[in-house]
Amino acid sequence: MRNILVSWSTGKDSAWMLHRLRQEGAGEIAGLLTTFNEAFDRVAMHGTRRELAEAQARAAGLPLWDVPLPWPCSNAEYEARMASVIRRAKEAGITHVAFGDLFLEDIRKYRIEKLAGTGIEPLFPVWGTREDTPGLAREMLAGGLSAVLTCVDPKQLDPRFAGRTFDAKLLDELPAGVDPCGENGEFHTVCVAAPCFNAPIPIEVGEVVERDGFWFAEVLLNHGDTEARSTAG
């Protein structure tokens, strides 16, 4: 029996990957593996606050395996901390780590190389080709997934897309050359509803700011909505 740890960016691809793993009966899902910037307590690039990642884990019914990373973080330090958590995972009986990569061969090769010899194997449940992502994006939406663009690379996409909902209208407005799933780093998302969640996560979108050459939209957990649901339920 596979015992799978899911590499969790908090974005739509991770959520859809978890959905596929469960749908296909790929094995026992042990938890969500997420790296956090120690200085800001957020998921790198996606800018997701810890409390929102924790809300996702509760909605998925899974424990969050958090990996704290210093800021700034060298590649050597990143690899050392990831190697440490992989050793811990092996001791806990994890057999596989699943990744939400879509078609970038160099990233896939890197994952495989870093897990080689650890006793843990990589899985790529949503892997395909560049030609697959338009259909994959529509498949996600048809399946009930909802997400918000939390980060935009202005060198590839207009900053006005930051903070927008990942929906059919947005897909129709993406410029030619921009991957519909943002696989080339054009944008990053935070997933707020998906088939792998037991309920949508109530959020509100705050200000959009420029930081380190990228545009970030602040996505906050709506505590009022959460409390109302809890009282009603």
Image (spheres, helix red, strand yellow):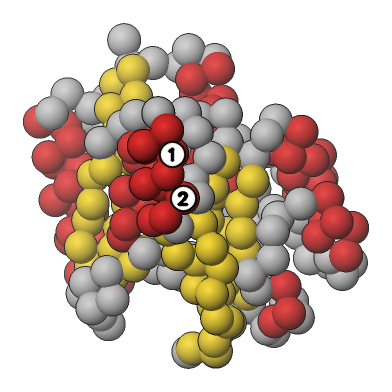
Task: Kindly identify which residue carries mark 1.
Answer: 229
Number of dots carrying numbers: 2
Q: Amino acid at mark 1?
A: Arg
Q: Amino acid at mark 2?
A: Asp
The reply, left or right, for residue 176 in relation to residue 119 is right
For residue 63, above or below residue 161: above
Mark 1 nearby-residue class (10 Å; few <14, some 14–19, many ≥20): few
- Quadrant in the picture for residue 143: top right
The reply, left or right, for residue 138 in relation to residue 11 is right
Task: Kindly identify which residue carries mark 2.
Answer: 225
For residue 219, above or below residue 214: above
* Quadrant in the picture for the C terminus: top left
Mark 2 nearby-residue class (10 Å; few <14, some 14–19, many ≥20): some
Name the residue nearer the viewer: 45 or 99.
Answer: 45
Residue 75 screen position, x and y as percent: 30, 71
Q: Which residue sits at x=39%, y=56%?
A: 223
Task: Say if residue 190 shows up in the picture.
Answer: yes
Q: Which element type, helix, strand or loop, lies under badge 2? A: helix
Whole-angstrom CA distance, mark 2 to mark 1, is 6 Å
Residue 140 screen position, x and y as percent: 70, 38
For residue 50, above or below residue 208: above
Q: Which residue sits at x=70%, y=55%?
A: 166
- Quadrant in the picture for residue 207: bottom right
Residue 60 screen position, x and y as percent: 40, 32
Task: Say if residue 73 shows up in the picture.
Answer: no
- Rendered image: mark on residue 102: none
Q: Which residue sits at x=81%, y=46%?
A: 134
Q: Which element type, helix, strand or loop, lies under badge 1? A: helix
Q: Which residue sits at x=47%, y=28%?
A: 198
The answer to the question of whether label 2 and label 1 lie on touching residues, with beta carbons closer than 8 A, is: yes
Name the residue nearer the viewer: 193 or 124.
Answer: 193
